[in-house]
Amino acid sequence: MTKVTASMMFLLFALIGFNSQLLAQDEEAVTDEEIRKYAVTMDSVAAMKENVKVVMKEMITSNEEISVARYNDLNNAIDDEAKLEEIEATEEEIAFIKEIDAKKNELTGEIKSTLTTMAKEYMGGVKVYNKVKKALKADPDAKAKYDGIMEELAAARNPEEEGEEEQAGN
């Protein structure tokens, strides 16, 4: 009986080992090109998010009727009629907050659409996008490559900041 048990244990371990090799083969390693494309995609999304902030700030600060502090109060109360009454919000102020919100939703929708398009068309599919995203969490080498590429992309997008840093160091 001991030989049978030992044989079964050996067979069990052999099957587990074989199965894990098959699983490892299913999970392709990410390529440098896939990491680069993911980084370009994420950099594009980051640039678009930054643009949303710039547009929102411009819309808020260019309104001569509503101060930034008043905007913040209105924005915090916009979903609560009682709070809006309490802070004596006017119809014009409420309309302005809703205009800002609509613009933000429009721009956010464009970001989501761009991300989906880039994942599908530029990266080669959502499956590749998810594979790289997963690898960045699990593989420190892939994450280091990604971080390096992101730094390059940021420097290329903001060359004036690099020059300012060099001048500050002198």
Image: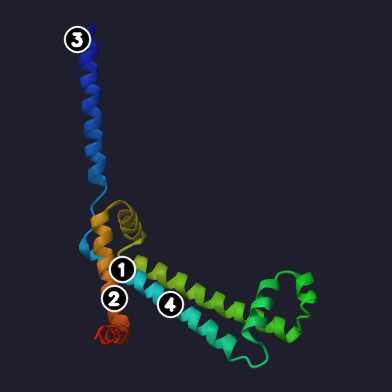
Residue 6 image offset from top left, x and y in percent = 21, 14
Q: Are marks 3 and 2 in contact (CB under 8 Å)?
A: no
The amino acid marked with disc number 1 is Ala
Q: What SS does tag 4 mark?
A: helix
Q: CA distance from mark 3 to mark 2?
A: 62 Å
The amino acid marked with disc number 4 is Met
The amino acid marked with disc number 3 is Lys
Residue extending farthest to the top is 1
Nearer to me, 115 or 154: 154
Q: Which numbered mark, 3 or 2, is in the foreground of this view?
A: 2
Q: Are marks 3 and 4 in contact (CB under 8 Å)?
A: no
Q: CA distance from mark 4 to mark 2?
A: 14 Å
Q: CA distance from mark 1 to mark 2?
A: 8 Å
Q: Which numbered mark, 1 or 2, is in the foreground of this view?
A: 2
Q: Which numbered mark, 4 or 2, is in the foreground of this view?
A: 2
Q: Return the residue at label 2.
A: 153
Q: Are marks 1 and 2 in contact (CB under 8 Å)?
A: yes
| Badge 1 or badge 2: first in the primary sequence | 1
Q: Return the residue at label 1.
A: 39
* Mark drawn on residue 74: none
| Badge 3 or badge 2: first in the primary sequence | 3
| Residue at 72%, 86% in the rendered image | 92
Quadrant location, the C terminus:
bottom left
Q: Return the residue at label 4.
A: 48
Q: CA distance from mark 3 to mark 4?
A: 66 Å
| Badge 1 or badge 4: first in the primary sequence | 1
| Residue at 57%, 80% in the rendered image | 103
Q: How is the image coloured?
A: rainbow
Residue 111 image offset from top left, x and y in percent = 45, 73
* Mark drawn on residue 3: 3
| Badge 3 or badge 4: first in the primary sequence | 3
